[in-house]
Image (cartoon, helix red, strand yellow):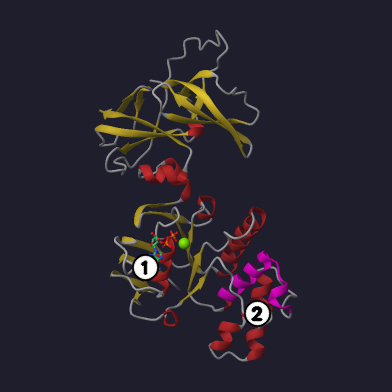
Amino acid sequence: MSTLEIRAVRHRYPAADDDSLRSVSVSVDDGAMVSVVGPSGSGKSTLLRVAAGLRRSTTGRVEINGQDVSERPTEHRDLTVMFQNPSLFDHLDVAGNVAFAPRLAGVRRREARRSAQRYLRLVHLEGFDRRGVGALSGGQQQRVALARALAAERGVLLLDEPFSSLDRELRTSMHDLLTEVRAAVSPTILMVTHDIDEAALADSTVVLIDGTVHQQAPTSELYSRPASLPTARLLGGFTEVPGDVHHGVHHSLWGRIPVAADCPTTGDAVLVLRREALRLQDPAPGAARGGEPHLPGLAAQVVRRRTAGARVVASLTGDDGTPVEVEMPFGADVPLGARTRVELTPGAPGQWALPTAHRSGTMACREPSRTGAR
Ligand code: ADP
Ligand code: MG
C-alpha cells in the first residue's frame, strides 16, 4: 500500500526572482496513476525533484504512506525515479542493470537476477539478460530503465517525461507497456509530461502552469470543462469567444449562447468552444434550413487548413478579427479564402459552452451545459 501526498509545496531556485512552485498540492492514491501536464518551464521537473527529495521545498511537505518524508533523503523515501534519459550502467549487462537496486539492498546475486528476469519478461525483453546495454536500441534501453525502476520494488514510481526522447511509434508502444505494467504490478505513479496525450494514460491529470495547479481531473473532463483560459490554451482546439454573461446566457457577436444553469458568472466572460462542436454553414444557395432556427455563429474566412489524424481542421478569422478553429470529417471541402459562417452544431456530443472569467483566468462555472439553438 503506497500513497503520495504533496501538500502546499512552494519552491524557489537560489537566485531566481520568482517561485518555481506556488503552493502545489497533488495526491496520488494507492495503485493510482496521476499525470502532471504543463508547458516547458512550468515547474514539472521541479515538482518531481521535490517529491523525490532531490530538492527541498521552501514550505509545504511530502508524505508517503501518510508519513512526512520531507526531511528524508531520496534513498529513505519509498520511491524510485525514472528520467527521460535511461542512464543505464554501461559496465553491467541488462540483468545487472535491472538487478542493481535489489543487489544494493542486499539481495543475493542469484535471487536478484531471477527477479530481474521476471521484470524483463514484464517489459518484453526476455532473453536479453546477458546483453550489453550499449547494443540496445533507444526503445529497448528505456524498457530496461523501466524494468530497473520496477525491480527496485518501491511503492511509488516517479516518471519525468520518460518517453519523450522516443519516436511516436515507440512512444505508443511504451504507453501500452505502461498500461500492462500497471495491470500486473500496480505501482503508485506520478508522471510529468508536456504531452497531453501521454498524460491521458493516467487516471487523473494535474494541469501545472507557471508553478500553479489550475485543475486536476480525468483528461476527458479537462477537454469538456477546462477550469481556466490558460488550461484551454494548453489543451488546444478551443475557440475563444469574448463577451459577457447575464442570467445564464453568453452574449457576443456570435449571438446568445446559453451557459450552465448553475453558472454564477456575470459580466465579462470568455466562452470556450471545442472545435468539434463547430461547423461551417453549408454555402450552397438555398441549403435551406427550412424552419431551422438561426444558430449562434459568426461570419468568417478560411485562412488555413490541415489534417489531424482522420479529421480536417480549418482555421478561420472571424469578422471581428478573432481566430476560430473548426474540425470536420476527412475530405471535407474547405477552400482557402472561402467566406462562410461558423456556427455551433446543435446537439453534437461534447458540445459544451464553458464560460471562463476573463480577467482572473479561472472558470466560475463548474458544470457544463448543452448549447444549441434557442
Ligand atoms: P519543466 O520541467 O516544467 O519544464 P522545470 O521544473 O524544469 O520546468 O523549471 C521550472 C522553472 O524553474 C523554469 O523557469 C526553469 O527555468 C527554472 N529552473 C529549473 N532548474 C533551475 C535551476 N537549477 N536553477 C534555476 N532555475 C531553474
Ligand atoms: Mg522538465
From the viewer's perspective, tell me whether residue 29 is left or right of residue 285: left
Q: Is mark 2 within 8 Å of ligand 2?
A: no
Q: Is residue 260 visible in this depiction of the protein?
A: no
From the viewer's perspective, tell me whether residue 129 is left or right of residue 240: right
Image quarter for residue 295? top left
Q: Give the range drawn in magenta.
A: 131-150
Q: Could you say where residue 259 lies in the image, as x and y percent from the top left?
A: 34, 31
Q: In this view, does 366 lie above or below 306?
A: below
Residue matched to label 2: 90
Residue 146 lies in the magenta stretch: yes
Residue 30 lies in the magenta stretch: no
Q: Could you say where residue 343 lies in the image, as x and y percent from the top left?
A: 46, 23
Name, please, the residue furthest toward the front. Answer: 15
Residue matched to label 1: 5
As measured in the structure, the alpha-carbon distance from the residue carrying label 1 to the one carrying label 2 is: 35 Å
Q: Is residue 193 above or below residue 303?
A: below
Q: Residue at x 54, y 50 (%)?
A: 197
Name, please, the residue furthest toward the right. Answer: 127
